[in-house]
Amino acid sequence: MRNILLLLLMVIIMSGCTNNQENEVDVMEKLMENVITHQLNEVEPEHRDEVNKWLSDAKLNGEEGQYYTKSYSDETSEFMYSYVYGKGYSDYEVSFIYTSSDEEYKGKISITGLKNTKEENTFVKIKSINDRSIMFILSDESLTDKLMN
């Protein structure tokens, strides 16, 4: 009986820890939405005409694996919108890296084109805080792959 009570107590404690971790992830996701978000094949309504023309030109004239970018920002906007297209890519890995010790660039947004499916020629919209200390890095090397090795 004593062992059963200990086991039940451990299960209750473990489930409490799991809920706390899930809550921490939810809170972090909400906080990050104010820093960076990304969506595949989405365009802000006010950018639609220009982005469609830019994307059409990039698809027509682009070379396999080459990246094309289009950005919108001004000094009064809270957010900056960037569109990234890489010919032949079906998905994108978007990572935000914050480095407080870097004097010039506090944040880096790394974008890597992925060839996951037969559907090609997708693009990604990145909405980030409008801060000049954020640098964009376009790469063929996945950060996930680098971390795994």
Image (cartoon, rainbow, N blue to C red):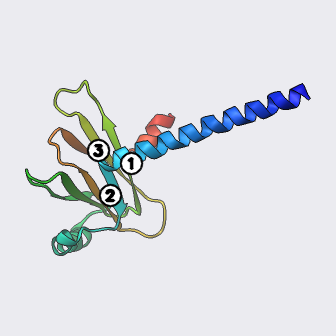
- Residue type beneath disc 2: Gly
Left or right, residue 77 beside residue 87: left
Residue where numbered disc 2 is placed: 65
Residue where numbered disc 1 is placed: 30
- Residue type beneath disc 1: Lys
Measure the C-alpha gap from mark 2 to mark 1: 33 Å
Of residues 112 and 108, the one drawn nearer to the viewer in this rendering: 108
Of discs 2 and 1, which sits in the foreground?
A: 1
Residue 95, image x, y percentages: 36, 45
Residue 71, image x, y percentages: 17, 57
Q: Which residue is painted at 33% across and 53% down in the image?
A: 37
Would you say the residues marked 2 and 1 are in contact, meaning their CB atoms lie under 8 Å apart?
no
Q: Does the rendering let one see residue 66?
A: yes
Measure the C-alpha gap from mark 3 to mark 1: 18 Å
Of residues 102 and 91, the one drawn nearer to the viewer in this rendering: 102
Q: Secondary structure at mark 2?
A: loop
Occupied quadrant, residue 49? bottom left
Residue 149, image x, y percentages: 50, 34
Mark 2 or mark 1, earlier in chain: 1
Rate crowding at label 1 as few (under 14), some (14 to 19) or many (20 or more) other CA atoms within 10 Å.
few
Residue where numbered disc 3 is placed: 109
